[in-house]
């Protein structure tokens, strides 16, 4: 299993009776492409943050590639994420004053492995994601939202992670571009034999995925 959650509970509030997330069992197999959907505020981003080790659950076991994230220190989780998980967050978290290549290079520098040829890989990814060469040297803050989303995807793929976690990465694309982007992303993922967990409220994207999951079916919500 790439991801396995067992008895996971999470609440942002201390002493909270009602958990935001309460997951008895949930797992992701290698090669799956999962679309998680659900209403705003339901806890989708929170769940992704738990699976990527940015948040720790109050209770339960979180395994990614058979490693227990809940038993790791913050530093161990950060290193594990850099080596194994590509993350594209809802706010893309690009460094605004660095250009596309340097944003990708920074992600590469955090990982233990990776090839020395990262710059060639970065430019290949930017080309594959159809970012014009003329835009590669611009600070990220000067790129359009759609371009920033694609740079964020390139950054997430640079270390060839086994798992890609993406939070609404298509929200600022129009429907034509959204479909093209998804096809492109699936091609890149297929070539790298990666597993994908993707959050979106846009069910029109469903055909690109092997499994659809409503957050309300993953988590039990009391009363
Ligand atoms: N850092 C935080 N501290 C306290 N509460 C938070 C925090 N982050 C999120 N929440 C709350 O937790 C709930 C779930 O938030 P989350 O961001 O996971 O929802 P979401 O399903 O991703 O929503 P959206 O579709 O709008 O992105 C919301 O009620 C939100 O207000
Ligand atoms: Mg969210």
Image (cartoon, helix red, strand yellow):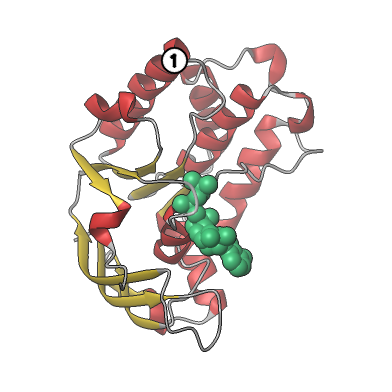
Give x and y (percent) for residue 196. 31, 43
Could you say whether the residue bearing mark 1 is in a helix, strand or loop?
A: helix
- Is residue 76 or residue 18 the one in the foreground? 18
- View extreme (front): residue: 223
Can residue 112 be seen here? no
The residue under label 1 is: 175
Residue 84 position within the rendered picture, expressed as x and y whole percent measured from the top left:
40, 57
On the picture, is 124 further left or further right than 222?
right
Query: Where residue 60 sits in the image (x, y, percent)?
Result: 32, 81
Depth order, front residue of 194/16: 16
Where 36 falls versus 6 (above or below)? above
Label 1 crowd bin: few (<14), some (14–19), many (20+), radius 10 Å: some
Q: Is residue 30 left or right of residue 175?
A: left
For ligand 1, give the image quadrant: bottom right
| Picture quadrant where residue 48 is located | bottom left
**Which quarter of the rendered picture does the N terminus lie within?**
bottom left
Corner quadrant of residue 140: top right
Q: Is residue 88 above or below residue 111?
A: above
Residue at 53%, 66% in the rendered image: 54
Q: Residue at x 44, y 81 (%)?
A: 72
């Amino acid at each position: 299993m790439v991801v396995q959650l067992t008895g996971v509970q999470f609440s942002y509030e201390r002493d909270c009776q009602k958990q935001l997330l309460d997951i008895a069992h949930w797992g992701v197999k290698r090669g799956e492409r999962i679309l998680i959907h659900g209403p705003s505020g339901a806890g989708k981003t929170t769940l992704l943050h738990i699976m990527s080790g940015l948040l720790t659950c109050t209770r339960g076991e979180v395994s990614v590639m058979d490693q227990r994230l809940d038993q790791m220190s913050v530093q161990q989780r950060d290193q594990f994420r850099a080596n194994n998980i590509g993350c594209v967050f809802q706010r893309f978290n690009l460094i605004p004053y660095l250009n596309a290549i340097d944003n990708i290079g920074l992600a590469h520098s955090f990982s233990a492995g990776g090839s020395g040829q990262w710059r060639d890989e970065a430019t290949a990814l930017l080309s594959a994601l159809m970012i014009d060469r003329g835009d590669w040297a611009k600070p990220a803050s000067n790129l359009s939202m759609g371009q920033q989303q694609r740079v964020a995807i390139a950054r997430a793929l640079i270390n060839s992670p086994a798992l890609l976690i993406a939070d609404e990465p298509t929200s600022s694309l129009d429907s034509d571009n959204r479909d093209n982007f998804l096809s492109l992303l699936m091609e890149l993922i297929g070539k790298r034999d990666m597993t994908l967990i993707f959050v979106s409220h846009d069910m029109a994207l469903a055909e690109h995925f092997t499994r659809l999951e409503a957050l309300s079916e993953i988590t039990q919500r009391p009363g």
